[in-house]
């Protein structure tokens, strides 16, 4: 008996799309200033481990009708809740067009177990 397998274009690809980003941590880790109003929305916050380091990722979206410039910075904490971030951490700038989604990320040092991200309007 001879088996015959035919490839039909377009039939071998399955696609799957989720409803959007998902969080695996409490969004209270995200500190937003009041200058962002409801224009900049935090859709998700995640923390994972890769090669022994913690990796945090926060998904933000411009829900407004005009371009917004924001600044963000991460702080990392050890198991006792002590801030172990470098004193030289600076604010990073992101420009979000209306409807645009941005993934803001940071990688920790080896002793970090948790994070907090602060997001503010560039006008601060």
Image (spheres, rainbow, N blue to C red):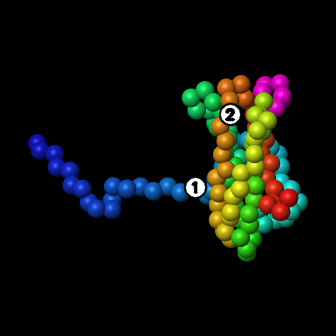
State whether residue 27 appears in this view: no
Q: Considering only vertical position in the picture, is 43 above or below 3?
A: below
Judge the density around disc 2: few (<14), some (14-19), many (≥20) Cα neighbours within 10 Å.
many
State which quarter of the image contains the N terminus.
Answer: top left
Q: Residue at x 76, y 38 (%)?
A: 88
Residue 36, numbered circle:
none
Is 58 drawn above or below residue 40 in the view shown?
A: above
Residue placed under numbered mark 2 in the picture:
108
**Mark 1, secondary structure of its residue:** loop
Q: Nearer the viewer, residue 28 or 106?
A: 106
* Magenta segment includes 78: yes
Which segment did they paint magenta?
76-83
Residue 102, horizontal then vertical, whole percent: 65, 57
**Does residue 17 appear anywhere in the picture?**
yes
Q: Residue furthest right?
A: 34
The residue shown at (49%, 55%) is 16
Looking at the rendering, which quadrant does residue 95 occupy?
A: bottom right
Picture coordinates of residue 74, whole percent (x, y): 75, 42
**What residue sits right under mark 1 in the picture?**
18
């Amino acid at each position: 008996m001879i088996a015959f397998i035919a490839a039909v274009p377009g039939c071998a690809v399955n696609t799957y799309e989720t409803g959007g980003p998902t969080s695996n941590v409490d969004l209270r880790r995200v500190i937003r200033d009041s200058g962002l109003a409801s224009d900049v929305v935090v859709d998700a916050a995640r923390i994972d481990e890769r090669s022994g380091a913690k990796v945090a990722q926060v998904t933000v979206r411009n829900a407004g009708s005009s371009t917004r410039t924001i600044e963000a910075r991460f702080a990392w904490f050890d198991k006792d809740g002590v801030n172990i971030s470098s004193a030289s951490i600076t604010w990073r700038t992101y420009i979000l067009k209306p409807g645009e989604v941005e993934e803001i990320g940071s990688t920790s040092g080896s002793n970090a177990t948790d994070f907090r991200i602060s997001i503010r309007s560039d006008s601060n």
